[in-house]
Image (cartoon, rainbow, N blue to C red):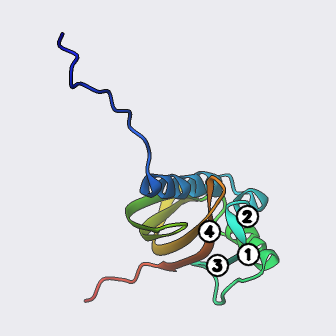
Amino acid sequence: MLSAGLSVQTAAAGPKEDVGAAAEKWATVFAENNPDTIMALYANDGVLWGTLSPTVRSEPAALKAYFVGAFQAPPKATVSFGEQLIRVYGDTAINTGYYTFSYTKDGETKSIPARYSFTYVKDGNDWKIVDHHSSAMPAPPR
């Protein structure tokens, strides 16, 4: 019998893959331009220092107000993730990397490269964002 010693292993996502999937979900929801929908991805005590914000947003109403404005300037923006460095520490995870926001203005596609860090906490089966920092990518040195 040739089956002795053979086993079938199924591929299962681990915590890093789950955190990566949470980031992709954020990108998908971001493209919907709906402040209520994106707020569901943040913990109740979530903090945001967004690319377009001069201040930290630490109250749910302030986070929502940020996204209301962000979804208007520029409208219908999308985001795509570049390299992600994901680290998981039990029920806490950090995802650091860069992403690019894209939008169309006057028929021309424009992009805004930015760097980010998301800190997540496990909430049941979901990873909720408790800290999100985003800043425009600096110009290369001359």
- Kindly identify the amino acid type of the residue bearing the numbered disc 3: Leu
Front-most of residues 138 and 107: 138
Q: Please tell me which of labels 1 and 4 falls first in the chain.
A: 1
The residue at 66%/79% (across/down) is 47
Q: Which of marks 1 and 2 is nearer the N terminus?
A: 2
**Residue 2 image point, x, y percent:** 17, 13
Query: The residue under label 2 is which amino acid type?
Result: Met
Quadrant of residue 128 in the image?
Answer: bottom right
Residue labelled with disc 3: 48
Give 113 or 129, whichever is nearer the viewer. Answer: 129
How many other residues sit within 10 Å of disc 4, few (<14), some (14-19) or many (≥20)? many
Task: Please name whichever residue, 80 or 58, is drawn nearer the observer in this view of the structure.
Answer: 58
Q: Distance between the residues labelled 1 and 4?
A: 12 Å
Residue 38 in the image: state x and y as whole percent: 70, 60
Q: Residue under circle 1?
A: 63
Callout 1: SS: helix
Q: What amino acid type is highlighted by mark number 1? A: Leu
Image height of 115 relative to 39, above or below: below
Q: Which of marks 4 and 3 is in front?
A: 4
According to the picture, the residue beneath numbered tag 2 turns out to be 39
52 horizontally vs 14: left or right? right
Name the residue beneath numbered marker 4.
Answer: 129
Question: SS for tag 3?
Answer: strand
Q: Say which quadrant the C terminus sits in.
A: bottom left
How far apart are labels 4 and 3 at the CA level? 9 Å
- The residue drawn where x is 34% and y is 32% is 9
Are the residues tagged 1 and 2 within 8 Å (C-beta)?
yes
Q: Residues within 10 Å of mark 1 (few under 14, many from 20)?
A: many
Structural distance between the alpha carbons of marks 2 and 4: 10 Å
Q: What element carries label 4?
A: strand
| Mark closest to the chain's N terminus, 3 or 1 | 3
